[in-house]
Image (cartoon, rainbow, N blue to C red):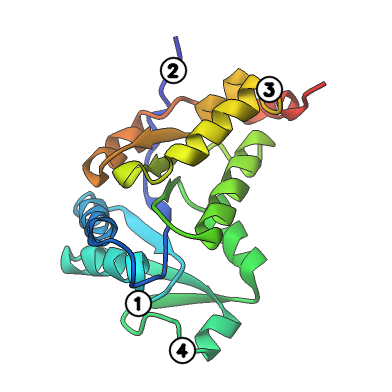
Amino acid sequence: MINASHVLLKTVSVFCASSNHVPATYLREAEQLGHLLAEEGIAVWFGGGDFGLMGYLARGVMDAGGKITGVIPEFMVRNGWAHPEVEQFVVKDMAERKRKLIRESDGIVALPGGAGTLEELSEALVSKQLGFISSPVVILNSEGFYDGLLSFFDRMIGEQFMRPMHRRMWSVVDHAGEVLQALREAPSWDTGDAGMAKIG
């Protein structure tokens, strides 16, 4: 039996798309998630943008009276991509942004997104696999968005690129309303298991 982590959530990092041209379902889920996190008194960290799921997430948090902080590289600020109503933590580059979002929060949630979101999710999982973090990672699989990726993970495990135990690194939910429970009841992860990252 896998023990649940029951982590204390003070901050949660959310990875998500910055496109305004995505199906409205994804935007509504982002807004709902922001609202739910704020209602629980959980501070939200995100990529700092004003567009797409990022913008709706921020709206949900702020409408519920919560705290949201952007972590955004300098070049994005110069290009005018920063959300004007959100406190911003400005960093040097994308690598520093990912390190802060991944390593300094109590939990991580990946919403639908593009290559940037996929990169952030991948780095979070690698950080967990190598024992740098033990935070719960929840994939919000709205409308089956991540079905292909989850199938790919299964193939990685089936063909021994990862171990079966690595499935404990992430949890999957279908709706924003399930995210908090998944974060709080995620399988525990011992950073001492880093040696298990090696396959061979």
Toward the right, the furthest residue is 200
| Nearer to me, 47 or 40 | 47
Labels 3 & 2 near each other (Cβ < 8 A): no
| Nearer to me, 200 or 134 | 200
Q: Secondary structure at mark 4?
A: loop
Closer to the observer: label 1 or label 4?
4
- The residues tagged by marks 1 and 3 sit, at their Cα atoms, a distance apart of 44 Å
* Of callouts 1 and 3, the N-terminal one: 1
Q: Secondary structure at mark 1?
A: loop
Q: Secondary structure at mark 3?
A: loop
| Label 2 environment density (alpha carbons within 10 Å; few <14, some 14–19, many ≥20) | few
Residue assigned mark 4 = 80
Q: Is residue 191 above or below residue 163?
A: below
* Of callouts 4 and 3, the N-terminal one: 4
- The residues tagged by marks 4 and 3 sit, at their Cα atoms, a distance apart of 44 Å
The kind of residue on which mark 3 rests is Glu
The kind of residue on which mark 4 rests is Gly
Identify the image quadrant of residue 146: top left
Q: Position of residue 156 (x, y in %)?
A: 64, 29
- The residues tagged by marks 2 and 1 sit, at their Cα atoms, a distance apart of 37 Å
Residue assigned mark 2 = 3
Residue assigned mark 3 = 159
* Of callouts 2 and 1, the N-terminal one: 2
Closer to the observer: label 1 or label 3?
3
Residue assigned mark 1 = 86
**x 65%, y 76%: residue:** 92
| Label 4 environment density (alpha carbons within 10 Å; few <14, some 14–19, many ≥20) | few
